[in-house]
Amino acid sequence: MSETPYRVFNVRLAERRLLTPNMARLVFAGADLAAMTTLAPDQRIKLFFPREDGTPSALPVSPDYLKVYKALPPHQRAPMRTYTIRAIDPARQLLTVDFVVHGDNGPASRWAMSAEPGDRIQITGPNKEYDGEIAGFDWEPPPGLSDLLIIGDETALPAIAGILEQIALWEVKPRATVRVELPCMEDAQPVPSWDGLDLRWLPRDAGNHGYGELMAGAALAADLPGSARRTGPAQPEAVDVDKDTLWDRAAPADNSFYGWIAGETAAVSRIRTHFLGELGIDRNQLTMMGYWRYGKAHA
């Protein structure tokens, strides 16, 4: 049994292609990937990119990798960013990750658009050889799910696409309302459909819309089903969207309604206030996650 639920994986870029104007798909290869696993469509991993001078990450493949990373002076740390596993094929030792790209703005987008096949980085992800509990995911719908609400932006699209692909395989599928804010309509991706799925893409370039505005608007306009249990308005804990981590995880063991919401932190905070403080929805039915902050680097 391995000692840690997450471990370091040494990988190289095998393939890169542009899926849509603002989304690139990168496929990584490496013998280490035979030991990577995933537990949910929104499984998170950490990517460690080269520093500005080109120095690559050199973390040890050992249980104390995080301690080693934190002990480095800040200027010597490889930039670290969080991404979602889009697909993992341990047998072929391949990992697929979708990147939102925005030019030379930030180490992740810069590397995603300039790296060549064979270029190496390090990734920390779930360790298949670990026998204990592995976290790093939040999609955990209740067994009796009948009504589902998903709201997200382009950063949540890899997870949302994976969630819809998973549901498409279920014998009994829920009624689902899905709203995805995107930079433009051309960023929409093919996803499965079924009777009862109401999916709408919300392109920002269709109007003068700021980041998260369409997400929040979709939440305010959502026609929540009767299964969205109301416990009465409750003022949620205050969140400083510039400093605090907004991360509420549902506990929906006996619920038939489930909400999964992820994207820009200020937008998710507004949605949280609406659902909890104004509508009084039971917070145990809602997973709400601030994936990133507008104008701020995020890890």
Image (spheres, rainbow, N blue to C red):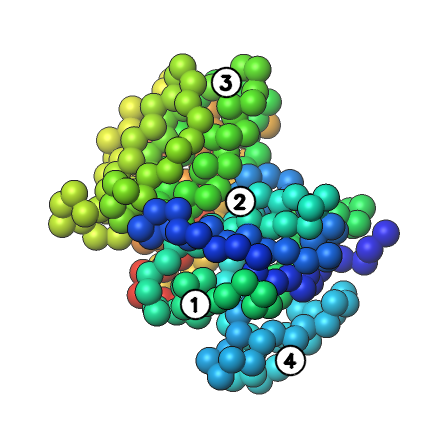
Mark nearer the N terminus (1 vs 2): 2
Which tag, 3 or 4, sits closer to the chain's start? Answer: 4
Q: Which residue is mark 2?
A: 86
Q: Do tag 1 and tag 2 residues touch (Cβ < 8 Å)?
A: no
Q: Earlier in the sequence, mark 2 or mark 3?
A: 2
Viewer-proximal residue among 204 and 137: 204
**Residue projecting furthest to the left:** 208
Left or right placement of residue 53 versus residue 118 in this view: left
Mark whose residue sits in front, 2 or 3: 2
Q: Which residue is mark 1?
A: 114
Report the amino acid beneath label 1.
Answer: Ser
Which SS class for mark 1?
helix
Estimate the spatial distance between the alpha carbons at disc 2 and disc 4, rounded to whole Å.
Answer: 31 Å
Name the spot of residue 148 as percent of width and height, x first: 43, 26
Query: Residue 173: which numbered mark, if any?
Result: 3
Q: Amino acid at mark 2?
A: Arg
